[in-house]
Image (cartoon, rainbow, N blue to C red):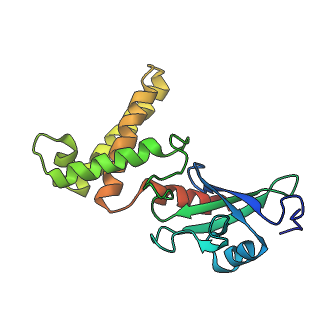
Amino acid sequence: MINLDWDKVNGLIPAIVQDHETLEILMLGYMNKEALKLSQSSGFATFYSRTRQKLWTKGETSGNKLTIKNILHDCDKDTLLVLAKNNGPTCHLNNNSCFIGAPSSSIIIDELEQTIDARFKEASISSYTYQLYKEGIKEIAKKITEEAGEVSISAVTNDGRVISESADLMYHLLVMLRKLNLNYSDVLEELKNRSR
């Protein structure tokens, strides 16, 4: 990292932490030179507590550490942007973000995955999701093939249903991923790896 303007910030540089996948703002902390060095060497976000006047690694008590993916600085070299993966709620109030309602590209996907998992566990015969789960991977895979075909037909015929058919396809894909104990975030990580 190039030289930061430590004098301008009296030795404590603001560090905005953002989820590296969803881009949700998770928290704001402060780093001194030692905290930044420790963050870079350990791979986990470490901050300087202004109230306790000491270093602390996020998650050292809760276990919800922030695994650093990248650290960027702003144009004035007096603020950091820490792109990280959170291993549990970032906020001490058990919220994903310290900023309630912070925009995220995956909130709806996370909620849908949680709903799918709940339907699997509830085992209600009246639940379509549970019926898919019970029928197994082969049946879910057939349904995905069917839904993909409907998306393609909608696109070719321009019947105005591409969005609704795509939503059906996404839902069934998520059911399959959860049946296999995989997450949508695993797919995003693979896409990110391919882009490199």
Vertically, is 137 above or below 108?
Answer: below
Picture residue at 48% right of the left edge, 67% below the top = 64
In the rendered image, the quadrant that contains the C terminus is: bottom right
Position of residue 67 measured from the top left corner of the image (x, y, whole percent): 58, 69
Instruction: Specify whether residue 135 is in view.
Output: no
Vertically, is 196 above or below 132?
Answer: below
Which of the two residues, 90 or 48, is positioned nearer the viewer here? Answer: 48
Q: In which quadrant of the rendered view does residue 44 lie?
A: bottom right
Instruction: Specify whether residue 20 is in view.
Output: yes
In this picture, residue 137 sits left or right of residue 111: left
Picture residue at 60% right of the left edge, 73% below the top = 56
Position of residue 132 measured from the top left corner of the image (x, y, whole percent): 21, 48
Which of the two residues, 55 or 153, is positioned nearer the viewer here? Answer: 55
Picture residue at 35% right of the left edge, 49% below the top = 113
Picture residue at 19% right of the left edge, 41% below the top = 128
Position of residue 176 measured from the top left corner of the image (x, y, whole percent): 32, 53
In this picture, residue 129 sits left or right of residue 63: left
Which of the two residues, 126 or 69, is positioned nearer the viewer here? Answer: 69
Position of residue 167 measured from the top left corner of the image (x, y, whole percent): 40, 35
